[in-house]
Amino acid sequence: MDVHYVGGALRKTATELRDKFKKALASYVPPPPEPKKYSITFDPNGGAVASGMTRTVTENAAIGELPVPARGGWAFDGWFTAAAGGT
């Protein structure tokens, strides 16, 4: 058996594998990260919401139509970030 030939063949094979790996690694594009999801809870502050009070939304996506609460003797003025002083 020719040890030099085998060693040379192994070096060649290892080099080829390394080059193929480098090429594959250079062209690899990782998948984009999963977008963040948030849970939004609508508090009707004593009113009633017909279409659900909690919604899961994806970051940078439209929330969609917001629920409109009903409460006798009150007019709905919009959703705010806090019961008092919110935006």
Image (tube, grey):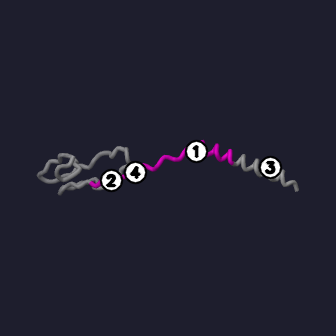
Magenta stretch containing residue 30, yes or no?
A: yes
Q: Residues in magenta? A: 18-41
Q: Quadrant of the N terminus?
A: bottom right
- Dot 1 amino acid type: Tyr
Residue for badge 3:
8
Dot placed on the residue nearer the N-terminal end, 2 or 1: 1
Tell me where residue 59 appears, x and y as whole percent. Answer: 37, 47
Q: Secondary structure at mark 1?
A: loop
- 76 or 21: nearer the viewer: 21
Residue for badge 2:
55
Dot placed on the residue nearer the N-terminal end, 1 or 3: 3
Asked whether the beta carbons under mark 3 and mark 2 sit within 8 Å of each other, the answer is no
- Dot 4 amino acid type: Lys
46 w.r.t. 62: above or below:
below
Q: Secondary structure at mark 2?
A: strand
C-alpha gap between disc 4 and disc 2? 14 Å
- 29 or 12: nearer the viewer: 12
- Dot 3 amino acid type: Gly
Residue for badge 1:
28
